[in-house]
Amino acid sequence: MATNEEIDRFVADNRELIERMMNLQKENFERSAELAKEFAEEAFDTTVKAAELARKQSEDFFKATYATIASPVVQKHFMEASLEFLAGLTAMVEASPIPDCMKDAASDAERNFRQAACKANADCPAKAKKAKALKECAE
């Protein structure tokens, strides 16, 4: 084992080399810390940009989907298809061998559905037809 005198002499003989090694280690540590910080900042910026892009794309997709579903043309076709489907079910019930009270209930349901749909639609053809008939009666 080295004595204190031997260690002191080694340090004294190699002081400049030891100081350069320590400074080099310090510089390497500082540079590594700086690079790590830059990397973390870039990763954060990239994540923020990716999140913003995802939010924008989601918003655009939602708007396009909503515009498609809420389109008056699409809604009109869905309502017409629903009314046709309901009319088909009513016709099937009326043609089936079931009691008349059930057939009446099916007809009433279709009529009520059509009335509710017409009441909710300002452009309902039945409203125009009714207004025309009332106008003719008044004349």
Image (cartoon, rainbow, N blue to C red):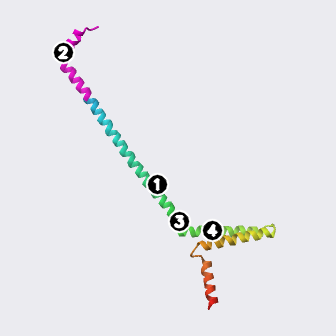
Foreground mark, 2 or 1, reads: 2
Q: Nearer the viewer, residue 115 or 81?
A: 115
Q: Which residue is mark 1?
A: 58
Query: First in sequence: mark 3 or mark 2?
Result: 2
Q: Which residue is mark 4?
A: 81
Q: Which residue is mark 2?
A: 12
Kind of residue at disc 3: Ala
* Position of the C terminus by quadrant: bottom right
Name which quarter of the figure residue 113 lies in: bottom right
Identify the residue shown where x is 35% and y is 39%.
40
Query: First in sequence: mark 4 or mark 1?
Result: 1
Q: Residues within 10 Å of mark 3 (few under 14, many from 20)?
A: few
Query: First in sequence: mark 4 or mark 3?
Result: 3
- Residue 104: x, y in percent? 76, 71
Q: Which residue is mark 3?
A: 70
Kind of residue at disc 4: Ala
Give the Cα separation between the discs numbered 3 and 1: 18 Å
* Position of the N terminus by quadrant: top left
- Residue 20: x, y in percent? 21, 24
